[in-house]
Amino acid sequence: MSGPPKADGAADAGTRHQRVRFYQVGSHVVGNRLLDPEQRTVQARTDRSNTLTCGHRACRGCGEALGARYVLDAAMRASGGELVAANATGCLEVFSTPFPESSWQLPWIHSVFGNAPAVASGVAAALRAKGRDDVRVIGQGGDGGTVDIGFGCLSGMFERNDDVLYVCYDNEAYMNTGVQRSGATPPAARTANTKPIADHPGNRFGQGKDLPRIAIAHGIPYVATATVAEPHDLERKVETAVGMRGARYIHVFVPCPLGWGSASHDTIKLARLVKETGLFPVYEAVDGEVVGVSKIRRQVPVEEYLKLQRRYAHLFGEHGRPDIVERLQAGADRNIREFGLLDGDEEVQW
Amino acid sequence: MLRQIEGSAAIAETVARCRPEVVCAYPISPQTHIVEGLSDLVRAGELAPCEYMMVESEFAAMSVCIGASAAGARAYTATASQGLLFMAEALFNASGLGLPIVMTVANRAVGSPINIWNDHSDSMSQRDSGWLQLYAEDNQEAADLHVQAFRIAEALSLPVMVCMDGFILTHAYERVDVPSAEQVDAFLPAFEPRQVLDPADPMTIGAMVGPEAFAEVKYLAHAKQMQALDVIPEVAADFEAAFGRRSGGLVRGYRLEDAETIVVALGSVLGTIEDTIDAMREDGVSIGALAIKSFRPFPMEEVRAALEGAKRVVVLEKALAVGVGGIVSANVRMALSGIQLHGYTVIAGLGGRPITGASLRRLFDDAVADRLEPLSFLDMDWERIEAELKRMAAGGRSGPHAENILREVGIVAGGSH
């Protein structure tokens, strides 16, 4: 077992931890290392804890692996390395722990699929009873473990305002079991059980489960959405959340090349486009009130996002469904109006 | 000090003296008074430091206990019936992870039909969940078993269920000597976890295990339960030395000397069984009883040693394994492998049906005369069953069983819960 990762772990980097290496990825994804050191992302620092270390079995281009490392490295830094994680069953759990090859560099527990928020609450209760208020607790899972099977436990954790930061890595379907729809699968998306057969348009149009808004409705201290395309924004939100007490929720949009039929190298691009189309509003809320939105820098039509993914391929081409694309665009436009996502829009008032 | 006290209140006070650090609660009859009592004690500051969590389901209650125990806290919860089944996935997880959680099961029937009264269907359904299962005969023993349960659980790093008959014990006012704080502190050392979620020593708990190691990990849970066969009697002996009374252990014999007929049972029904045996002994019948105190692990050798000299064994069970009959008796028969004797399984007391002395006397008389079927049901109303079977055989939409039978029985006990 490795020793504890330290926020200032540079001294440890070559011994107990693998040395963090950087590759030129041709973008500003990892954080621009030409910036002043203080302005760099945690990911761009050689002293980051690499909480989910290399060697795990995630697919190439996995957004969830990226999201988890961004979140946990930022949380480790913000908590001074005093962090415990409770993980739901799912891709993140499976690809990280084919024992003895655990990738986790922090104390980490996996119990079952639907109880990560409650396990995290139990850890937090134990720490409180033991007077360890320096240690922070994170619960985490995919969208299935969060919006579906773990929803009861999550809502209970919110309602009690337990001292837990819960992070959902949303890749919009049950990927670990082979891409079945979840309560977070968007309309028209093809999954293994929402195939566009006959005149079915992929996943049905409905309300879905907009968990960030459900979390806000619980009146918990902090709720935020983010994508893996903007590490500065994501890390700031994690740092804010770790600095607060009570129930906190961060919903991170993480593309899944395997489940979405997208190119591995398009993971970051898709995470950027989903925000720039308005399909996924990026915002944060404090005590039940939206206090800030991340504006769209360059609005793009939803086609630009959809066409990069084979799960939407049935909407285009000779037998395409422009009517459905139009409905998806209308949904994006509604988000833009509602959250004031374009420059010059009024801040949202809830 | 002996006090006249409700069973649940005695359990709440005893659990409090075991200094749990996290108590998780979700209401379900008939265990609710226990967690209500603990809530009062926590709010009054008599149990500190302790986090009392009222959660949204039994599944969450067990999950909170899992997190708390893995973080090194002594964790406790209580449940019954549907609640125990709602926890089922987390129960297997807690034992698989080797977390020494202690839980009271206030034994209650499992629906459908929904029924709040006592039998052992709930805990018996979880006999293979990897938890130790200890059964209390009365409220004194129920209280004592909780003190022992924490010590056994933490010695073995395995979770323990203390099973006590719902209502019959939980709601009964009896004389109980609730162990004092000083006594419990002397008997129960502070919890030293075998594994703990600690940033100073980060470990991965709950990793994926494939065919290369799964069987070995599972076997270790079995090996620890086999160790419990030594630990349980040791702890019971220590308890007797410290508290001056016998409670717990693996089995307890009653008037087994030269007994040709031995009745095997678990829980509070032993009292009525022993009264019946006393009366029959006075009439010259050589009959005795064997109380099974630890159902998991199942004390094969002790059961075999107690029963091997008998001519017949009657296993009185408060649960029905639909499709085969007995659960306890299947285990008893395994213990008696190779020994020829008459074995009778009797299903009794389902859904709170009273097990009366008169019924037991008739039953035991039939057993002694070998007039029993291998599987029989105490005080079953066969007329109602025949009528319903006839309705079904007539075909068509004969309607729901429970409602059909209740219509014939009429209003007998229209109580509320």
Image (cartoon, rainbow, N blue to C red):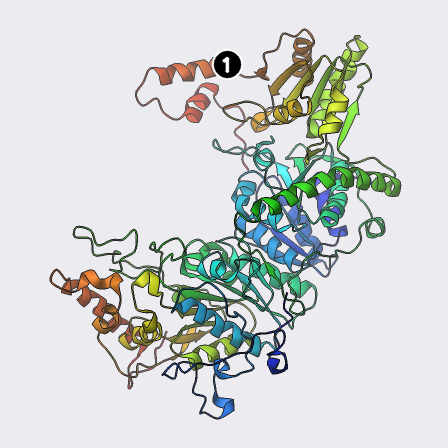
Q: Position of residue A265 (x, y in %)?
A: 33, 73
Is there any visible trace of residue B159 in the rendered image?
A: yes
Taking B128 as reference, is A21 left or right? left
Q: Position of residue A169 (x, y in %)?
A: 43, 66
Location of residue A90 by image quarter:
bottom left
In the picture, the quarter occupied by the C terminus of chain B is top right
| Mark 1: few/some/many CA within 10 Å (<14, 14-19, 20+) | few
Q: Position of residue B156 (x, y in %)?
A: 72, 47
In the picture, the quarter occupied by the N terminus of chain B is top right
Up the image or down, B101 lies above or below A87; here it is: above
Up the image or down, B266 lies above or below A50; here it is: above
Between residue B33 and residue B330, name the one nearer to us.
B330
Which residue: 30% across, 79% down? A340
Which type of secondary structure does the marked residue at label 1 adopt?
helix
Q: What is the number of callouts on the image?
A: 1
Q: Which residue is mark 1?
A: B382
Location of residue B222 by image quarter:
top right
Going by the picture, which residue comes out furthest to the left? Answer: A318
Between residue B212 and residue B306, name the one nearer to us.
B212
Q: Position of residue A255 (x, y in %)?
A: 36, 68
Up the image or down, A180 lies above or below B165; here it is: below
Which residue: 47% across, 16% down? B384
Which residue: 65% across, 21% down? B315
Q: Chain of mark 1?
A: B
Which residue: 65% across, 9% down? B366
Is there any visible trace of residue B355 in the rendered image?
A: no
Amino acid type of the residue tagged 1 in the rendering: Trp
